[in-house]
């Protein structure tokens, strides 16, 4: 690590901000020593707010039916080999029961943009979950909807919303999505979610096709400016039935480096160590936590659909053994000196 990089990392730790050019410098000149230095500061920073606690979210994949055709995604509507499913209200409530008994206090309802999940259907679902488990937090991850729709879901009791922006660069967004999808609409959704009062999560893939270091530097600037409550990042992983099938997967080391930077930009952000990290590297999720992440999101979906929500190839935790995700993750986190807690896991406010 040269002095320039060291000084910039120190500055980031103190000021929580760098210029795009400075972010570019610490990314371009990344080496093992810089990664260690950065991770060390990031871990100190997260310990200050979250101690050695890791929050869990129970991920329920409610439908893999999607009207969109994102070029990188395995459940894109153009993938006719995808075996489609949709969970019933009963199925979903059952997942919540299991989750509650396992100590989950946050449920993430995630799905493709499936028209079946109208405001009426989702509001009814939210109310039923809240009625049964008033102390839980409900997070939605159901894609782009209208402001009115977001408002209705919020009024019904959803408090958090995850919508990855995928890339902070409009030109790059165009290369990853069909013409009918728009970056500006996605950004508009994020702004509206925030205005309504949701705790909002954005995020992007690391080393998606055509992403450059410059783009990653812009991602860092975007996080700095948008100040999301949560930020989901994970390596891009090719899916065999997409046109990116032959592209290389993103790097675990770079993802971890970015996690550390994000922690220093936004000390209290809720930062998941994603399943994609665990897919590329068996110790990926541990590495993410050791780089400054503080959330894990094990799968709570019914076992029969787990291998169908396949955004990318070789996703982990899709077999029968996945009923034990919670205890598996507890063990994994304990092995590196962290503890999974039974808690809603709200963001600490400075
Ligand atoms: N590799 C990694 N992440 C992906 N996602 C979708 N497809 C892939 C892929 N091939 C991510 C997107 C999406 C989230 C639910 O999963 O960022 O927002
Ligand atoms: Fe799913 Fe380990 S987290 S089996």
Image (spheres, helix red, strand yellow):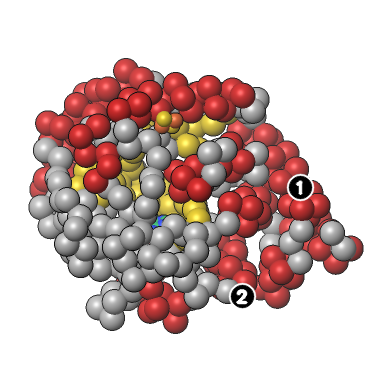
Q: For the N terminus, which image quadrant? A: bottom right
Q: Are marks 2 and 1 in contact (CB under 8 Å)?
A: no
- Mark 2–mark 1 Cα distance, whole angstroms, equals 22 Å
Viewer-side residue, 106 vs 77? 77
Mark 1, secondary structure of its residue: helix
- For label 1, the crowd category at 10 Å Cα-Cα, with few meaning under 14, some 14 to 19 and many 20 or more, is some
| Residue beneath the point at 69% across and 57% down | 16
Q: Residue at x 58, y 68 (%)?
A: 216
Q: Where residue 24 sits in the image (x, y, percent)?
A: 69, 71
Q: Is residue 215 above or below residue 88?
A: below
Res 10 → quadrant: bottom right
Q: Residue furthest right?
A: 3
Nearer the observer, 301 or 249: 249
Asked if residue 130 shows in the view, the reply is: no
Residue 211: % across, % down: 52, 72
- What residue do we see at 41% from left, 60% from top? 238
Q: From this viewpoint, is residue 172 visible?
A: yes
Taking 153 as reference, is 263 left or right? right
The disc placed on residue 36 is 1
Which is more toward the observer, 193 or 243? 243
| Image height of 300 relative to 109, above or below | above
Q: Which mark is residue 111?
A: none
Residue under label 2, please give it.
214
Q: In the image, 70: left or right of 259?
A: left
């Amino acid at each position: 690590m040269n002095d320039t990089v060291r000084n910039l990392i120190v500055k980031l730790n103190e000021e929580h901000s760098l210029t795009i050019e400075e972010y570019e410098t610490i990314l371009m000149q990344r080496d093992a020593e810089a990664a260690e230095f950065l991770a060390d500061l990031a871990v100190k920073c997260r310990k200050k707010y979250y101690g050695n606690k890791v929050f869990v979210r129970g991920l329920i994949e409610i439908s893999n039916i999607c009207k969109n055709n994102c070029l990188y995604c395995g459940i894109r509507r153009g993938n006719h080999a995808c075996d489609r499913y949709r969970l019933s209200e009963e199925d979903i409530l059952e997942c919540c029961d299991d989750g509650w008994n396992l100590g989950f206090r946050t449920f993430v309802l995630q799905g493709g943009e499936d028209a079946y999940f109208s405001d009426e259907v989702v509001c009814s679902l939210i109310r039923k979950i809240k009625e049964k488990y008033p102390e839980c937090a409900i997070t939605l991850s159901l894609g782009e909807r209208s402001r009115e729709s977001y408002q209705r879901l919020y009024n019904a009791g959803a408090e958090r919303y995850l919508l990855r922006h995928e890339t902070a660069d409009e030109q790059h967004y165009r290369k990853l999505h069909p013409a009918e999808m728009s970056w500006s609409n996605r950004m508009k959704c994020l702004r509206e979610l925030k205005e309504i009062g949701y705790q909002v999560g954005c995020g992007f893939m690391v080393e998606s096709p055509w992403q450059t270091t410059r783009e990653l530097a812009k991602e860092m600037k975007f996080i700095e400016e948008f100040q999301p409550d949560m930020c989901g990042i994970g390596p891009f992983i090719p899916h065999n039935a997409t046109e990116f099938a032959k592209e290389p997967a993103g790097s675990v080391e770079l993802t971890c480096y970015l996690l550390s930077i994000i922690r220093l930009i936004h000390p209290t952000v809720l930062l998941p160590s994603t399943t994609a990290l665990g897919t590329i590297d068996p110790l990926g999720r541990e590495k993410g936590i050791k780089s400054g992440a503080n959330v894990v999101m094990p799968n709570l979906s019914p076992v029969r659909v787990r291998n169908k929500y396949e955004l990318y190839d070789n996703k982990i935790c899709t077999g029968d053994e996945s009923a034990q995700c919670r205890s598996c993750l507890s063990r994994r986190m304990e092995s590196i000196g962290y503890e999974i807690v039974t808690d809603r896991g709200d963001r600490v406010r400075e």
